[in-house]
């Protein structure tokens, strides 16, 4: 993002830069001439199967990254120690974002790292026994986790799974839909 504004640090962004970046973020899913990141297309297919009203386009679903900062390199190309340092630096922001969600919001954790970070927030998490979502020969199957996260007076149903949506073909994404079918208004993290 900084290169879009020819700035070398976030502190060098001026008010107009921040206003423009905010507008671009808010319009990301509404801009019909923009191609979404492939992750969102795949996650949208899972959301829409569960409930056609759940969509990034209409704002009934949102994505919350466990790291608020953009990185120059793709996340998957960062070393584990770099990822961990970024996650630790952003944990307070992530916790605030989760705690500010409306009571009853469903949190979907895409992959094991997202689930791990939900458990690292220091909030009370009540777990149910895990479930096998499907059986894939290569991995031994995708496993689901179900729980409730508590923040003060708020309660958030939580669902998580062991594979990343972006790595699953449509047939396995359908299994995720079946796994979380019985849940209602939704926000995802990853």
Image (cartoon, rainbow, N blue to C red):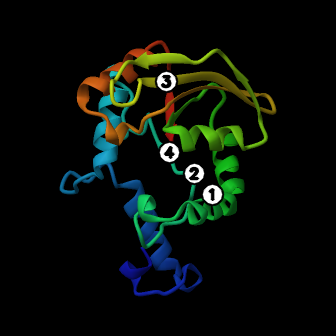
User: Residue visible at 31% across and 25% down?
Assistant: 172
Q: Which mark is residue 87?
A: 1
Residue 148 in which image quadrant? top right
Residue 61 in which image quadrant? top left
- Indicate the secondary structure of the residue bearing disc 3: strand
Can you tell which of label 2 and label 3 is closer to the viewer? 3
Q: From the viewer's perspective, is 30 left or right of 105?
A: left
Mark 3 lies on residue: 143
Q: Which mark is residue 66?
A: 2
Q: In whole angstroms, how far apart are the C-alphas of marks 4 and 3?
A: 16 Å
Q: Residues within 10 Å of mark 4 (few under 14, many from 20)?
A: many
In the rendered image, is residue 57 in sight?
no
User: Residue visible at 41% across and 55% down?
Assistant: 26
- Residues tagged 2 and 4 counted as in contact (Cβ below 8 A): yes
Where residue 116 appears, as percent x and y from the top left, is: 63, 40
In the rendered image, is residue 146 in sight?
yes
Q: Residues within 10 Å of mark 2 (few under 14, many from 20)?
A: many
- Residues tagged 1 and 2 counted as in contact (Cβ below 8 A): yes
Where residue 70 appears, as percent x and y from the top left, is: 48, 66
Instruction: Tell which residue pokes out farthest to the left in this image.
Output: 33
Mark 4 lies on residue: 190
Instruction: Tell which residue pokes out farthest to the top in this image.
Output: 182
Q: Earlier in the sequence, mark 1 or mark 2?
A: 2
- Residues tagged 2 and 3 counted as in contact (Cβ below 8 A): no
Give whichever of 148, 96 is nearer the camera: 148
Q: Residues within 10 Å of mark 1 (few under 14, many from 20)?
A: many
Q: In whole angstroms, how far apart are the C-alphas of marks 3 and 1?
A: 23 Å
């Amino acid at each position: 993002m900084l290169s879009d504004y020819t700035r070398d640090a976030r502190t060098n962004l001026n008010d107009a830069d921040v206003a423009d970046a905010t507008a671009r973020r808010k319009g990301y899913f509404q801009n019909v001439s923009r191609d979404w990141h492939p992750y969102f297309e795949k996650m949208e297919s899972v959301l829409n199967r569960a409930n056609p009203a759940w969509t990034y386009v209409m704002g009934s679903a949102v994505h919350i990254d466990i790291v608020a900062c953009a990185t120059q390199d793709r996340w998957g190309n960062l070393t584990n120690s770099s990822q961990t340092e970024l996650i630790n630096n952003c944990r307070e922001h992530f916790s605030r974002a989760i705690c500010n969600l409306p009571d009853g919001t469903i949190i979907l954790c895409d992959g094991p790292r997202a689930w791990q970070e939900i458990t690292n927030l220091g909030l009370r998490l009540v777990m149910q026994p895990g479930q096998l979502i499907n059986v894939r020969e290569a991995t031994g199957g995708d496993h689901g986790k179900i729980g409730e996260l508590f923040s003060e007076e708020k309660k958030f149903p939580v669902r998580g799974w062991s594979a990343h949506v972006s790595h699953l073909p449509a047939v396995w994404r359908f299994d995720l839909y079946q796994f979380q079918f019985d849940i209602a208004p939704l926000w995802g993290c990853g």
